[in-house]
Amino acid sequence: MLVVISPAKRLNWTERDIPVTAPAFQEDAVRLAKTARSLTLRDLRALMNLSPELARLNRDRFRDFAADPDPKAVRPAVLAFAGDTYQGLDAPSLDADERGWAQAHLRILSGLYGLLRPFDAIQPYRLEMGSRLKTRRGATLYAYWRDQIAKVLNAEAKGLDTNFLINCASQEYFGAVDHAALKLRVVTPQFLEDRGGQPKTVSFFAKRARGAMARFVIQNRLTDSAALTEFDMGGYAFSPELSVPDRPVFVRPYPEP
């Protein structure tokens, strides 16, 4: 099966002595970076609701974005992203065999790169999928990517002989996958915190749990979505009462301080 996750705003640019691969949509990333490079600081701030400091940082990143970057200027995507999902995934602790399986089965949705394998080389950037960046294809990144991401996922799933896609991405990012073009059965796990008998989603914990679920799939080499119900990392347990087909729900007691 394939698993998709979201990227992260926060980056960890620690140097890694790990071979990298070329992103499938490198040319598109260069094109989008060039478009973003033309924006003023005010435009960048408005585009992603950035502080003046972050706007300057990302202006410089887009300015320095290269079509053929120096190997020292890139990092493996799954090790460069450092948000909550990636804390749950904990990719640095995966062994060599697990990393190899992840490279074939795990994908990262990206506003700039479209779709990344874990060890694809990325340059530092920030460009949320929900950004209203105007390009020749439309007024948003959703319009830019259209059905391209879905087509690649279909092809990769066919190569793996699977029709399952485990969606551990946020709504913002999975919204870039054209559902009409996607030929896969999508399974979207939900993670709830139970406090006083009223389970609810807590964004911080849900993001980390989605990364942990991706790790669970990788470490157990899952091929059947039914096996997802065995997930118990972080104290979560499958709730058949709250689950519906293709939307398994996992609940745990609310973690008190």
Image: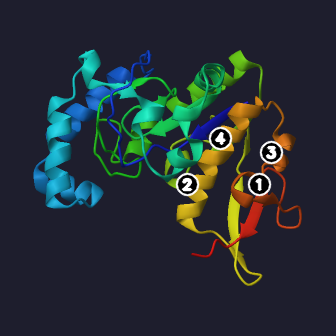
Mark 1 or 3, nearer chain start: 3
How is the model colour-coded? rainbow
**Mark 3 secondary-structure assignment:** helix
* Residue that badge 1 annotates: 247
Q: Nearer the viewer, mark 1 or mark 4?
A: 4
Q: Amino acid at mark 4?
A: Ala
* Residue that badge 3 annotates: 228
Mark 1 or 4, nearer chain start: 4
Estimate the spatial distance between the alpha carbons at disc 2 and disc 4, rounded to whole Å. 16 Å
Q: Is residue 257 above or below residue 111?
A: below
Task: Identify the residue at horizontal 45%, vertical 20% (top origin).
Answer: 24
Estimate the spatial distance between the alpha carbons at disc 1 and disc 4, rounded to whole Å. 15 Å
Q: Amino acid at mark 2?
A: Gln
Q: Is residue 185 above or below residue 53?
A: above
User: For residue 47, which quarter of the picture?
Assistant: bottom left
Q: Do callouts 4 and 3 mark residues in contact (Cβ within 8 Å)? A: no
Q: Amino acid at mark 3?
A: Leu
Crowdedness near tag 1: few (<14), some (14–19) or many (≥20) residues, C-alpha within 10 Å = some
Quadrant location of the N terminus in the rendered image: top right
Q: Is residue 76 left or right of residue 251?
A: left
* Residue that badge 2 annotates: 171
- Percent x, y of residue 19: 44, 15
* Residue that badge 4 annotates: 214
